[in-house]
Image (spheres, rainbow, N blue to C red):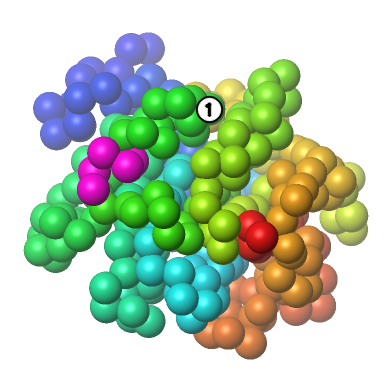
């Protein structure tokens, strides 16, 4: 049945099917979601009770990665697939280390873009950070528009972030080529932070509940696609990997901050189904 248009929904929002950015927001306890997203999320939790903890573990990894980069002197960030603002946004973490840090957020979900803009304006920092609606798969559009904001200096190292987003690029599209294009545009000394869903090495990969979640997402407007550890590692070709290299999100530099969700997976970090890495461009 066709949904009745919601006058409070930003222009372009698809309320016919649940959307991953809004579902993720609901998992994290946010409010930038609609009934169709909450219904999807509730079914997902019933199917796979750990899914909220897994979502938080991914968010915690993002925070640790941004803090690490900021502590290495990176003071400008391009967060592609940034999602809906929630606890631990990139600009908040970065400026807690360096008050002069800057960030450009990019997402193709109108809700994420609208809420990001509202957050920046409410905090009074819209002159130092920016948000764009754009498709990760089109670097020829995203990159120049990100630079046109005036927030980023392309002559200095940039922290490029693609956390929790590359698995929405279909397997029949050139994800590796897309990532390499962005990396080719980064100046020397830049970093690339990313994570990806996988069933490679997951002890419970054959678990019926995990498979049910995968099938459930295939019916949403944003189905996800697994890639192997080797395929994920290819995204970092030519980069210097920060120790421990390719790791589970619940296992990456957990000493660098609070890891309440990761702690719940200490006995089996693979339960998150998420691998991650941080690489530096020589």
* Residue at (67, 21) in percent of width and height: 173
**Residue at the front extreme of this rendering:** 155
Considering only vertical position in the picture, is 272 above or below 168?
below
The residue pinned by badge 1 equals 137
* Residue at (85, 55) in percent of width and height: 202
| Tally of numbered discs | 1
Do we see residue 174 in this rendering? Answer: yes
For the record, the magenta segment spans 146-150
**Which quarter of the rendering shows the C terminus?**
bottom right
Q: Looking at the image, which is closer to me, 100 or 58?
A: 100
Q: Is the magenta region chiefly helix, strand or loop?
A: helix
Query: What x and y, as percent, mark residue 221?
Result: 49, 25
* Residue at (15, 55) in percent of width and height: 126
Query: What x and y, as percent, mark residue 226?
Result: 75, 38
Specify whether 123 is left or right of 273: left
Considering only vertical position in the picture, is 230 above or below 157?
above
Considering only vertical position in the picture, is 48 above or below 29?
above
Do we see residue 32 in this rendering? Answer: no
Query: What x and y, as percent, mark residue 265?
Result: 72, 73
Q: Looking at the image, which is closer to me, 161 or 210?
A: 161
Considering only vertical position in the picture, is 14 above or below 245?
above
Q: Looking at the image, which is closer to me, 214 or 129?
A: 129
Q: Is residue 17 magenta?
A: no
**Which quarter of the rendering shows the N terminus?**
top left
Specify whether 139 is left or right of 206: left
Query: What x and y, as percent, mark residue 205?
Result: 86, 48
Q: Quadrant of residue 193?
A: bottom right
Q: Secondary structure at mark 1?
A: loop
Q: Quadrant of residue 8?
A: top left
Question: Crowding at label 1, few (<14), some or many (≥20) Cα neighbours within 10 Å?
Answer: some
Specify whether 208 is left or right of 176: right
Q: Is residue 147 magenta?
A: yes
């Amino acid at each position: 049945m066709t949904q009745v248009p919601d006058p409070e929904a930003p222009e372009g929002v698809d309320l016919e099917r649940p959307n991953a950015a809004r579902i993720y927001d609901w998992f994290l306890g946010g409010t930038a979601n609609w009934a169709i997203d909450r219904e999807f999320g509730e079914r997902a939790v019933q199917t796979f009770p750990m899914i909220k903890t897994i979502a938080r573990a991914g968010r915690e990894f993002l925070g640790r990665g941004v803090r690490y980069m900021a502590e290495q002197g990176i003071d400008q960030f391009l967060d592609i697939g940034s999602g809906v603002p929630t606890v631990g946004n990139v600009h908040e973490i970065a400026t807690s280390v360096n008050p002069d840090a800057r960030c450009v957020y990019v997402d193709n979900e109108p809700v994420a873009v609208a809420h990001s803009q509202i957050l920046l304006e409410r905090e009074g920092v819209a002159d130092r950070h920016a948000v764009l609606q754009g498709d990760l798969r089109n670097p020829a559009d995203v990159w120049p528009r990100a630079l046109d904001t005036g927030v980023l200096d392309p002559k200095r190292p940039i922290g490029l972030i693609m956390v929790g987003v590359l698995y929405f690029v279909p397997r029949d599209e050139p994800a590796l080529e897309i990532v390499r294009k962005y990396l080719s545009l980064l100046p020397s000394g830049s970093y690339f932070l990313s994570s990806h869903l996988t069933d490679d090495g997951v002890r419970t990969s054959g678990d019926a509940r995990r498979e049910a979640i995968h099938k459930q997402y295939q019916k949403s407007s944003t189905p996800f696609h697994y890639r192997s550890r080797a395929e994920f590692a290819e995204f970092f070709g030519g980069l210097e990997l920060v120790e421990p290299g390719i790791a589970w999100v619940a296992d990456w530099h957990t000493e660098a901050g609070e890891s309440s969700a990761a702690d719940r997976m200490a006995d089996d970090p693979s339960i998150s189904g998420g691998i991650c890495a941080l690489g530096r461009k020589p």
